Image: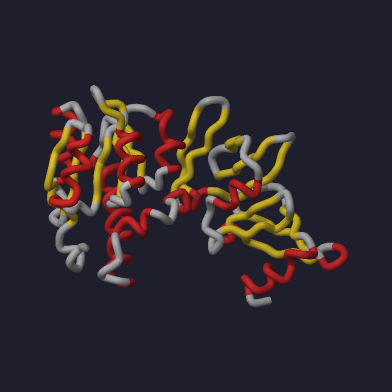
Amino acid sequence: MVDQLRTIRVMIVDDEEPARSELKYLLESFREIEVVGEFAGGDAVINAIPSLNPHLIFMDIEMAGSNGIQIAEKMHAAQIVPLLVFATAHEEFAVKAFDLNAVDYLLKPFSAKRVAKCIEKVRALLQEAVQTNSTKRVGELASVPYSLQKLAIEHNGKASVIDTKDIIAVYCAEGQLAIRTANKCYYSNMSLQEFYSRLDEQLFFRTHRAYLVNIEKIREIIPWFNGTYNLILEGLAEEVPVSRQQVPKLKKIFGL
C-alpha cells in the first residue's frame, strides 16, 4: 500500500519502446511516481506483479503477440488487481476497458495535461485507500466501477467516453436512451435501469420511470398536479417530471 502517498509504484506495458519512453517522461514530472517496470506485453507482466507490487499499471491494448484486454482479464481471474489505466491509440475498446474497471482510458498521443488529470484521479483513489484501511488491497477500490466517474457510451459501433458529472439528464426518447450534457446529446441502446446501475446513486436521482437527473444540476423544484413535481435543471430547457412515488425521496434529498 502507498505510504501516505509518498510513492506510487507504476508499471508501463507497451510493445513500442518510444511510447513507453514518452509516457515515462511525462510521469517523471510527478515526484511521487516511481516507474518500477517496463514490459512489452505477455505473461511477463502478470509474473512480475507480485515482486514489483505496483499500485498502477498503464496498459496498451493492441501489442505484437499480446493483447492488453486479455492480460487484464487474466489479472482479474488471478485476483491480481492494481489500478489499471489503458493507454492506447484505439477508441473502440473503451467499453470493454471500463467493463474491466479501468480507472481511466488514455488515447495516444499522450498530452501532459491529460496524464496529469489521470494521475490526479489515481492519487485520490489511493488516498482513499490509505484513509479507510491501510491494509486494504488497492484493487478493491478499482472493483467499484470507475464508470461512476467515467462512462463509455456505445452507439452504432462507436464508443464515446464522458465524465458522468457532465451529464444533466438521461431519458427515454423514441426507443433509445438520450444522455444530455451541456454540449451534446448522446444516444445508447441500454435500458434506463442498466444505465442507472453504472452511475453513482449519490449523484443521480431517478425522478420517474423514464428519467434520471444529475442532482447537482437541479436549480428549481416546482409543485405540480396531484402531489407531483417538476424540476428545472441547469442546461436543460425542458422541465423534468417527478412521479408521486419518487416525491418522498426528492424531499429527503433536499430536506423538504
Q: Is residue 206 above or below residue 108?
A: below
Q: Is residue 176 left or right of residue 97?
A: right
Which residue is at 40% across, 54% downward?
143
Q: Residue at x 12, y 47 (%)?
A: 36
Q: Position of residue 231 (x, y in %)?
A: 70, 59
For this view, does 66 lie left or right of residue 22? right
Q: Which of the 4 quarters of the picture holds residue 16?
A: top left
Question: The C terminus is located in which quarter?
Answer: bottom right
Identify which residue, 114 or 46, lies in the foreground. Answer: 46
Q: Is residue 1 left or right of residue 184?
A: left
Q: How is the image coloured?
A: secondary structure
The residue sitting at the top extreme is: 64
As drawn, the residue found furthest toward the front would be: 78
- Coordinates of residue 199 in the picture (x, y in percent): 53, 53
Query: What x and y, as percent, mark residue 155?
Result: 56, 30
Count every numbered label the image shows and give the total: 0
Residue 240 image point, x, y percent: 72, 53
Q: Residue at x 64, y 49 (%)?
A: 193
Give the residue furthest to the right.
Answer: 226
Q: Residue at x 33, y 66 (%)?
A: 128
- The image quadrant where one finds the N terminus is bottom left
